[in-house]
Structures are given as structure tokens and as C-alpha cells.
Image (tube, grey):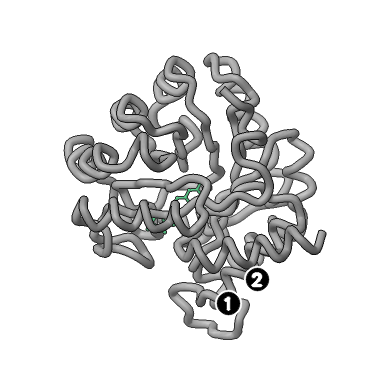
Amino acid sequence: MLALEERFPRPSVMGVVNVTPDSFSDGGVNLDPDAAAATARRMWSDGAAIVDVGGESTRPGSEGVSLDEELRRVVPVLERVAGEVPVSIDTAKAEVARRALELGAVMVNDVTAFRAEPSLADVAAELDAYVCLMHMQGEPRTMQVDPRYDDVVSEVASFLDERLRFAVARGIREDRICLDPGIGFGKTVEHNVELLRRLDVLLSLGRPLLLGLSRKSSFGKLAGDPGARTGPLGASLAAAVSAYERGATILRVHDVREHVDALAVAAALT
Ligand code: HH2
């Protein structure tokens, strides 16, 4: 199997398919498995390198879902598309990851970086999956109440470094792993801006970076709407191009075609 940076060269787009009733920007749209499968196929034909399928919202304030409910949401979608479209499973549960990988998913995207269920690392190692390890301060239910850091960039970097070492110690090959600062996960607008401005510090960890910027409210706020609950498309595109130019490898997005076009132009101009 190829190293992650060869399989997903800069810039690669990851399309988001949330099989949930309550995700912050596309909740309910893909709850029906046929609709979700059609979305995944469209994203693939629009140029996504991989499609991230998730059955649990992690939006601020959200509660978790049970194992049975998460499996009930994602398995029918994976049965329809995994093997045909490259799929990442967005889960913190080892059993969901195992089922997804057995059905043909190639990546595990865990927003808890193996803290919720450390045995998820063993599943990823055994089934030789690509892995995304993300930083989050606190938990979704309360993470946006009062996020605080002394130095957000060095704290996120040392967290990701520690989780990278953990993953490798559990048997995952380092060249399978990418890292993600977790934009909006226990972070103010200023924290998110600081992380993006100083992406070079995270790059020095030596692994490709995945960034989820799409539709996040911070970019709506930066675009001039202090009460924004989601970010408009133009703001997401600017953030994605800027992150790419600062070294990001994979951009996780809802609007695949627009991001593929924007990043193709940005790449042609570098
Ligand atoms: N953001 C979300 C979910 N999963 N995974 C990674 N690696 N990085 C991210 O930034 C990230 C993520 C939140 O976005 P979305 O999936 O649209 O919403 P929800 O969590 O409400 O389903």
C-alpha cells in the first residue's frame, strides 16, 4: 500500500457525507442510504480523492450516538459505495471502524485521536488503514463554552506528536498517518486563525496535514458576520486555498466541485 502522501498528493479533497439528522451544515440531507450513496458517487466524479462517511455529529453541543445506531446509519452506505469510491470512516468507535474497513473503507478519521477507544488503533493497525488523528480540546457537548490555551499552536503540536507516537507504538505505520489541528474543536476564532497562520509548526511534525475548514462558523465571522452559524462558500474556498498554500495536503469539504477547481488553480500557480 502506498504512503499516505503518495496516495493523497497535495492538494487532495475529502468530501463529507454525514449520515446524521443533526450535523451542523448538512444534517438530514444524507440520512437515507441511497441519497448518501448518490452524494458519495457525485463527490467522487467531481474530483474528491476520498469521501468521509460519518454517523455521529460532533458539532458543538452534540451528544454521542450508540454503537448500534451508528452502525445502522453507516453500514448501508458503505455497502453501497465502499470498494467503488475510496471511503474514510469518521468514527471514534473501534467496532464501527472494523465493520467499515471490512466493507472496503481505506481510512479511519477519529476526531478523538484514539482517546475515546484506544483499541481503535489496534483495528487500524491490523487492517492496515490510513489514519487521521485530530486535536480536540474537551468534548463536543461543551468544547465551545470557554476554550483556553497558553499557546494554542505549541499545545496542539505537542498533542499531535504524542498521539502520533501512540499510534505508531500500537503498530500503525507512520507513513499511513496524517494529522489535523481540529479547526473549531474547542477553539475560538482567534485560536483557529493562529493555527492556520502557523501551520509550519504543525508541518514540522513530519506528517501530512488534513484540514476541515468547510462551512465552519469562524470563517463566516471572519467574512464579516459576527453571528454566523456556518461559513459561506466563498469563505471556505479562501480558507482552503490559504491552508493549501501554507502546506496542507488534504482538505475536508462539503462542496467538492468548487474546492477541486479552486485548489487546481492554486496548485497551477505555485
Ligand atoms: N470536522 C467535522 C467532523 N469531522 N474530522 C476531521 N479530521 N477534521 C475536521 O475538521 C472535522 C472532522 C465537523 O464537520 P461536519 O462533519 O460537517 O459536521 P458534524 O460534526 O456536525 O457532522
Question: Residue visible at 45% across and 62% down?
Answer: 254
Q: Position of residue 4 (x, y in %)?
A: 61, 33
Mark seen at residue 234: 1
Q: Can the viewer see residue 171?
A: yes
The quarter of the rendered structure image containing the C terminus is bottom right
Q: What's the residue type where badge 1 is placed? A: Gly
Q: Position of residue 262 (x, y in %)?
A: 63, 67
Q: Position of residue 160 (x, y in %)?
A: 63, 36
User: Neighbour class for label 2 at 10 Å: few (<14), some, many (≥20)?
Assistant: some
Q: What's the residue type where badge 2 is placed? A: Ala
| Residue closest to the eye, 39 or 234 | 39
Q: Quadrant of residue 35?
A: bottom left
Label 1 vs label 2: CA separation?
6 Å
Question: Residue visible at 73% across and 63% down?
Answer: 266
Per the image, label 2 sits on a secondary structure element best described as: helix
Residue corresponding to mark 2? 238
Q: Can the viewer see residue 141?
A: no
Residue lying farthest to the right in this orientation: 270
User: Neighbour class for label 1 at 10 Å: few (<14), some, many (≥20)?
Assistant: some
Residue lying farthest to the bottom in this orientation: 224
Marks 1,2: beta carbons within 8 A: yes
